[in-house]
Image (spheres, rainbow, N blue to C red):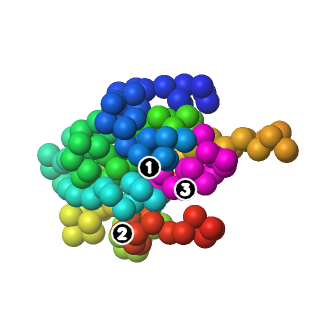
């Protein structure tokens, strides 16, 4: 599972020349750096500062059905430096992989942290009209984030570390200091 999280795939084109060039620029051509955790933070900060999320994520053909997800992928996102929140996550994942950090994109429902949660919409189960009510801005219920794998040699332990790049961007357009937790 971890080895496959280093390979290019559809929409996460980590071998794209523009993605590799950007990763090299952002890491000063030293993607392995002294600390993979700090490299991951620095790359997330660069995406946070340089990518402009725009557009909606879900396409619907009526109030109760989702007909698709708008996704261009990392390669078009790096050329435009803008796209949907899904494209932002795909770009971060591709940059992580280009730097040698195993990474994966996760898409899921965030009921508690979204407008749907504040409107007391229950977790999705089956078709729930309230989940797709445009008055509740439910596109925010579907969320995309990135996880990178971090291995601790001293403790012989590894785990997936989540990075919610859209929430970082919504909180500030500027990267936090690397020393911050």
Q: Name the residue under label 2.
A: 173
Q: Residue 155 carries which label?
A: none
Dot 3, crowdedness within 10 Å: few (<14), some or many (≥20)? some
Q: Name the residue under label 3.
A: 41
Q: Which of 160 and 13 is in front in this view?
A: 13
Dot 1, crowdedness within 10 Å: few (<14), some or many (≥20)? some
* 20 relative to 87 in the view: left or right: right
Kindly give the residue lying farthest to the right in the view shown: 155
Residue pictured at 43% horizontal, 42% vertical: 23
Name which of mark 1 and mark 3 comes first in the sequence: 1
Instruction: Measure how far apart labels 1 and 3 are at the Cα level.
Output: 11 Å
Instruction: Measure how far apart labels 2 and 3 are at the Cα level.
Output: 15 Å
Residue 165 in sight here: no
Q: Choose top left, top right, bottom left or bottom right for residue 181.
A: bottom right
Residue pictured at 85% horizontal, 44% vertical: 154
Residue 125 placed where, x, y %? 42, 49
Q: Choose top left, top right, bottom left or bottom right for residue 71.
A: top left
Q: Name the residue under label 1.
A: 26
Q: Nearer the viewer, mark 1 or mark 2?
A: 1
Residue 172 located within the stretch drawn in magenta: no
Name which of mark 2 and mark 3 comes first in the sequence: 3
Q: What stretch is highlighted in magenta?
A: 32-44
Q: In this view, does 157 lie above or below 42?
A: above
Q: What element carries label 3?
A: helix
């Amino acid at each position: 599972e971890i080895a496959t999280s280093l390979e290019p795939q559809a929409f996460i084109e980590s071998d794209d020349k523009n993605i590799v060039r950007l990763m090299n620029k952002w890491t000063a051509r030293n993607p392995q750096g002294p600390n993979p955790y700090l490299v991951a933070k620095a790359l997330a900060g660069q995406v946070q500062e340089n990518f402009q999320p725009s557009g909606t994520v879900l396409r619907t053909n009526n109030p109760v059905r989702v007909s698709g997800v708008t996704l261009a992928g990392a390669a078009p996102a790096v050329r435009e430096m803008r796209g949907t929140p899904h494209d932002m996550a795909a770009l971060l994942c591709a940059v992580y992989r280009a730097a040698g950090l195993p990474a994966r994109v996760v898409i899921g429902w965030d009921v508690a942290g979204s407008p749907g949660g504040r409107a007391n919409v229950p977790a999705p189960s089956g078709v729930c009209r309230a989940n797709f009510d445009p008055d509740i801005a439910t596109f925010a219920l579907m969320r995309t984030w990135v996880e990178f794998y971090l291995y601790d040699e001293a403790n012989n332990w590894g785990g997936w570390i989540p990075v919610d790049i859209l929430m970082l961007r919504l909180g500030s357009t500027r990267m936090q200091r690397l020393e911050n937790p």
